[in-house]
Structure formats: structure tokens, C-alpha cells
Image (cartoon, coloured by chain):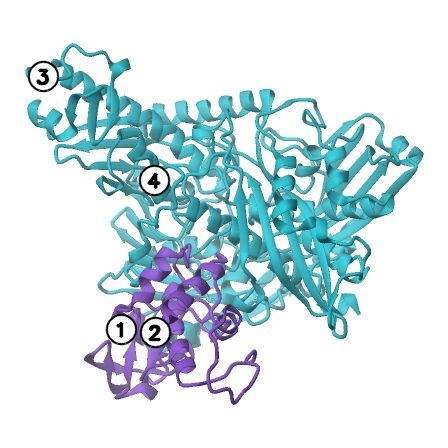
Amino acid sequence: MTYVGQPVDRLDGTAKVTGEARYSAEYPYPNMAYAALVHSTIARGRITRIDSATARKTPGVLAVITHENAPPMKPAPKMTPMDLSTLATGTTVNYLNTDEVHWNGQPIAVVVAETLEAAREAAHLVEVEYAEFPAVLDFAAEEGNATPQKNSLISEGGAKKGDPDAALAAAPFSLDLRYTTPGHNHNAIEPHSTTAFWDKDRLILHEGSQNIAWTQGHLAVRFDVPKENIRVISPFVGGAFGGKTMVWPGTVLTVLAAKVTGRPVRLMLTREGVNRTVGGRTPSIQRVAIGAEAGGSMTALIHTSITQNGKVGGGPEQVTSQTRHLYDAANLQVQQNLVELDTIANTVMRAPGESIGSFALEATVDELAYKLGMDPIELRARNEPARNPIDGKAFAHRMLLECYEVGAKEFGWGERSPEPGSMRDGKWLIGMGVASAYHPAWQFQANVTVRLSADGTVLVRCGFHEMGMGAATAQAQIAADALGVPLGAITVEYGDTALPTGPGAGGSGQTASIAASLITACEKLRRSVFSVARKTPGSPLRGRRFADVRAKDGGLYDGSRGESYQEILRRADRASIEAQVGSDTRLGEITGQVRFMSKFLMDRRRWVKAACGAQFCEVRVDSDTGEIRISRWLGVFDVGKVINAKTAASQLRGGIVMGIGMALAEETLVDPRNGRIMNAGLAEYHVPVHADIPSIDIRYLDDPDPTMPLGLLGIGEVGIVGVAGAIANAVYHATGKRVRDLPITLDKLL
Amino acid sequence: MVDVRMRVNGSIEKLDLEPRVSLLDALREHLGLTGTKKGCDQGACGACTVLVDGERISSCLALAVQYADRDITTIEGVEDPIQQSFVRHDGFQCGYCTSGQICSAIGMLAEHAAGAPSAVTGHLAAEQIDLTPEEIRERMSGNLCRCGAYNGIVAAIQESSR
């Protein structure tokens, strides 16, 4: 039986439909106390008075911690590529260890009480006065102050080939367009939640996290304890999408509150608190310019962007990433630029960069197709590169045109009449649009152990993360195939820093990262089991060669000679045999980091690795009101080998749903006068609901990438890329209106 | 403090609560029934949906003291084939909205069976309303799923409505 590729039900499915799955605010401790945050109401300044006397007198209040009485914490660590956990810093503010305010919403006090209600009540009673400083708050107004992003080891700010400006000026057909996209918030349905308990100088932390190792490393620095003293437990994460990658103030302050009170403390951020204390996706201003010949060949392609960082943290988004790879333009330039604002640090959110960058690029390509009188898929085919356009490197795998071919046929692209406004159903204007999806493939370090027990069961242990991807199910499928055992024989332990250190869930790289180590560990295990069997008197495997032995039917067999794992272990009188890849010793850690970095740099020199796809969408626009409905969707993807047909399709579909939200509704609104997010709730920040989402058809080519473990390329992010572009293009086809400012709301069509 | 007696998942629970405690917090923090989720605490996401005498409500917008002597069903008390339909159709990813989706679906199916129309029902007085995907989507739109598992949820509900 082969499990890899099958639509296996999630192993944690029953736990999730019965309410048994425990998230981080759901671990009971005796004597639990509850925390609530007080947020600043100014963007920049100094606290001149903070009066917590009334709050303290509230019945049930145990402590009101402010900068006046908080114990010292160490500042956030400086970033270094030799310790990737230094990337976990949400913001560089040393919360409650300073009277300075750096963004509107920064926590300036934490109240701890016997009950949730008392904590929340008292939080409202803390009185604060400020001396305000001038602040930079209006992203749009900062455009003129943007500075180019510098190239770093991990992320490149710009690149140039040829003379794109001259080529653009000389091109017989050209476009030079400006796009804007707003900020977004992940708004996972589980608010960030922490349960913290100090047992003397040892911390137990239940935390919904995409990177428990980073969380552990970061808190060890902040609280000045060895990281072995901190255990982070996170078996279920209620959605994350990038928002639970860094360590945000709620986590740090819950740990602090537990330390101050000596009690187990639980903090679940309010929905407003999520928006105020967890960074979101940066807004952007983008320019895409294309010059082309009459036959469609691109002679110039320029894509530049401006995004924001918080002065207290955040990183650049690779907005122009896909533009390096998608079109064979003779002259090409990409450049990302940054402005710094007195806002909360921005952070990664599903396909940071490509999700918004592809909107601008793919809408411009569509506009060019109209200008040339050419089908937009044909235009893409004419500019499909044989090698990576920006630097001539080889593609490890590239089947973008195959995706379009399959998609065009399945979607009925040929039935589209290209003239805008030409397809109609009563009052509904119908539009069809396409766009390309693209996302780089990542692979990180993963330590894994695999233990085979005498009863034939297998235990896979790795501190990875499950936020809904079906991560454990996919790894169980891989292990079952590698060892030739039934899926039911496999148990996977994850989400705990007590386990071998796993990769973070980010960059769509978790599955590939674990798979690489797991396959090696299973191979080592098979060898160990075989060498035990070979030496055991009476074993049918005596005298056999490992090269001839296959793992199947729950054992090792050379043709029909061989026996079950249970028999092998029983015969050898062994309770279990274990294999390990990677190590959590200091030396092992350093080796792991070096191995990751050298593989990353070597791979980058040799290949461009990425998942890609073709998004097909049909919209219906109400000709009276401008209301936009998505009526059909097909996404065809080249994501290499798919491990679980069911969960992979779900994840790709989920990316498309989030992309539909981004295209039509989502927008973090910031008051430019005071830097305060105005729609910090799910009633005002509109994510897609059931009624917004039609049946979404997902196809994938299932052709393995030869350079990735099992040939898989990662599926978490590519699904959102191209979605907004495809919708904008379909809206144009329906209405003849180009909307270059997200979200595409009905007022922009009237 | 107020003594409250309510029936939760078939057993009588006696609680001594402040009047300001929401039904959601009473379930999660006082009874340890953490299967019911808090997503927004503002009635905007549906994650906290429970059944009260068979009707779906947002438990975050309900004060526990108002529900004395009512019959409350949380996900821990649900035993319905729809749960396995959710697994088969992959009607969730992270699982955090799932308890609410399932309770809401059960309540919604009862509303439909009682003949309640929705905003997309063609004839408000129709004798029989087909539970089309469009009807299900409309009736389930109070339950957000940020992972975007909507297709699977609709398929699971459709399967169990047959």
C-alpha cells in the first residue's frame, strides 16, 4: 500500500470535530490567574503619569504591572544568521521596561486577576497621561521618503538586467502603471493565547505558535534563563498565516505576569488586542512598467515597490519576487523600497510579497494583452522563459504553461469573448480572468527521531507545527511508506520543544523540511533493523544483502524471504530500535545551522526552485450596484509531488479564499492622524464568509521536482498568489474598468 | 454572585457566577468545556456557537445567568454523523471554528426542517425549500473560517442533510 498521494483523512480529525483538541488557552492549571492588557492610545510619546490605584482596588485584582513596577527584562536579541531564533523578535520594544510609547496600541500595563472579568474591568480603570512626540503615521504621505532596500543574505532588495528604461522608452507598446494595496491582518480565528507557568526557574508555556523553537530562544534571552528551562507546548494552533511566527507582546507579558504573581497566568488577546499588538501585512505602492513588441515579446519589465517597516521592527516584503522569474523580458529591473513609520512592526502574512506583488504584475500583463489585442494566456506563453530571466539560472522545475493548458481546457477559457462587457446574464456582467501564481520553495533544518517498537508500532518525533495543514498526517503517510507499515501503526508527536527541534511553519517549507530528515531517519532505521536481523540466529534475513531487502507488509523482505518487524525484534529480544537525524546538542545545533545555510546558499547558486500555478476566475458584477460576486474558480498548480490529495487541495483552496478576501474586502484602516487601527475587529475587517465563496476547483500536475525531498514544493502560500490579479482582470473583462487599488469594492466600479 | 443551575450536555450543572459572566466563559472557564471556542467575543465570528434548547446562539453574547434551567448542548455533547462528514470532506483545517460550525449546522438544519426561509429563498412561503449549496452558504454565513474550508463544510452539511 502506498499512502503518499492518497486523500487520507486527517489523523487529528476526530479530535477537532469533538472539541477534544486543546488550544493554548485551554490547559487547566490549579490556581489559574487571568491577564488583560492596557494599550496606549497615542502613537509616539512618553508616559508622564500612570495611575493604577483604582484598578488595584478592583476586587480580585492580583497585580497591575506597569513600567513603574515591572521587573527588568533583557532587550530583544540582535539578529544574527548564526542563530535564526533571533529572527523571532516581534518588536524591539522592551515592554513595561520603558515609559516610551512607540505605536498606537502598544501594551503599557498588564492586569492580573482571579477572574477574566476582573482583569478586564481593572484594565479599563488604569489612567494614563502622555507627553506626545511628533510621529510618522501616514504611509501614503511618506512615498517621497522611501529608500532602497539593501541586499542581505536572505533577501535581495533589487536587481537589474540590461537597460530597461531605454528599452521601455523605445518599445512600440508600453504601459507604466501605479498600484496600491492596503495593510492586512491575519485575523486567525483563534486569538493569540498564552498560558504560562513558572515552576521556580523553569517555564512551561502553552502558546499557539508557528515556531516553538524561536519562541523558546527568544524568551530565554528576555527572561535570562537557559533555553533548556523553557518548554513550549503547541500541539494545536487555531490558524496563524504568519501571524504566530514572531513573539508578540502578549506572550512576553503573560510570562512576565506569571513571574510577578507566582501563579499560572492565561492571556487570550481580545480581537482588538490581536490587531493592536500583532503586526500585519504592510501596505504597498507599486509601479509596473512593461515595454513589448507587436508580437508580444517583452523588451522591458520594471517592477518597483514601497512598503513600510515599523521603526520598532518588521522586515521588507519581497513584493517584486515573482517578477524576477515569470517573464522572459530582455531588459528587467526590480527594486523594493522602504519607509519607516511609528506603527507596530509589520510581519509576514501568507506569501508576504508575492500575494500583493503578483496583483500589480499580473494586472499589468493583462492590460498589455488588451493593448496588443492578444489573448492573455497566449501573451504569457510568448514570454515564458527557458531559464530564470533575471540571472539565467536553471529552473529546477517549471510547468507553468502546462498549468495554463490544463486550466484553459477545464475552465472553458475558449468560450470567453474578450471584449469587455460582452458577456452578460440579465443584469449580471460576466468576466473571466487569469493570473499566474508563483512561490519559492524553502527547506529548513529538521531534527527527527523514529522509533520502531516490538509491537510493530512506529513513533515519529519532531517539534513541528500543526496550524491546519494536516502536517502530522502527511508525515505519517511518508513514514508508513518508507517503513512499509500500515498508517495506523504510526504515531507522530509534534508541537513541543521537548521533542527534537523541528522547522518553523513558514515559507511553505515545513513539510519538505521534515520529509527530508524523516526519509533519512527511516532509511537509517531500516538499516539498523536489518543489521539486527542479519545477526540474529534463525532469522530468515541471515546472509541477505541490505540492497536486496524491501520494507513492506510491516517488515523486511528479500523477495518472499524475510519477516515482520515484530518477529525481528522478538527474535533479537529488542524492545525497540531507534534512528535519529540531527541533534539538539550545542554542537548538533551549530552543525544544523551551518548545514542549512550552506545548502540554502548552494541551492540558490544552482537553481531557482518554486511552485507555480494558473488561477482562473469568473466574476459576476451587478450592472446596477457594482456588487462583485465570484461565481467560478479553478486553480491549476505545479506544486511538485502532492503528499495528501485531500489536505493539499484544502490548503490551496484556503489560499484562494484568503486571496478573494484580499481582492474584494480586506483592508486594515489606519487613522493617519494618530496611527490607530480603526477597524480592529471582525465586524469591520471583512474576511470572506460562506456566502462569498463558490465551489473552488483545484487541480495539480503532481510532477515531482527532482531537487526537493519526495519532489514536493510546498503548498501553503502559492494558492493566494495571483488571486487578486485574476479577480482584477475578470472585473475588467466584465466591466471595462481597471481598478488598481485594493480592495476592489463596488464604489470603485460606479 | 448568583446561583445558576443549567443543564449542559444532559447533566445538571450548578454554578456560582458573577452576573457579568458570559455563557461562553462559564462553559470554558467554569465548567472546563473548552470545545466551545472564543474567536472574537463580539458576536462577529460564530466560533462560540452552542445549542440552547436546540437553537443556535452565539454564547459570547449571552450572559450565563439568563440561561438558568435551559438545556445547553456544546460540541462535547454532540454525537452526530455530521462530525464524521466534516472529517471526510475536510471541512476544517486548524479546527478552531469547527465546534461552532458543527453546532451551527445542526441548528441550521433544524431551522430548515421547520420551514424557515433564508435571504436567498425564492419564495418565503414555499412549502419545501431545497437545501442547495447557496442556501447552506447563506444560512452558515455567521460562522467564519479563516482557513477557508468553506467548500468542505458545505459538502459535509449537504451530505448529512440527505
Task: Mark 2 vs mark 4: tell me if same chain.
Answer: no
Task: Mark 1 vs mark 2: tell me if same chain.
Answer: yes
> Residue at 30% of width from left, 23% of height from top?
A523
Residue A420 pos. (x, y %): 81, 58
Q: Which residue is mark 3?
A: A536
Task: Mark 4 vs mark 1: tell me if same chain.
Answer: no
Q: Between residues A594 and A426, which one lies in front from this camera angle?
A: A426
Q: Earlier in the sequence, mark 1 or mark 2?
A: 2
Spatial CA distance of label 3 from label 4 is 34 Å
Judging from the image, mark 2 belongs to the subunit labelled B
Please identify which colour was used for chain A in the image: cyan
Q: Which residue is mark 4?
A: A463
Please identify which colour was used for chain B in the image: purple
Residue A82 pos. (x, y %): 48, 28
The amino acid type of the residue labelled 1 equals: His
The amino acid type of the residue labelled 3 equals: Thr
Q: Is residue A476 above or below residue A234?
A: above
Judging from the image, mark 3 belongs to the subunit labelled A
Q: Which residue is mark 2?
A: B25
Q: Residues within 10 Å of mark 3 (few under 14, many from 20)?
A: some
Spatial CA distance of label 1 from label 2 is 7 Å
Q: Which residue is mark 1?
A: B30
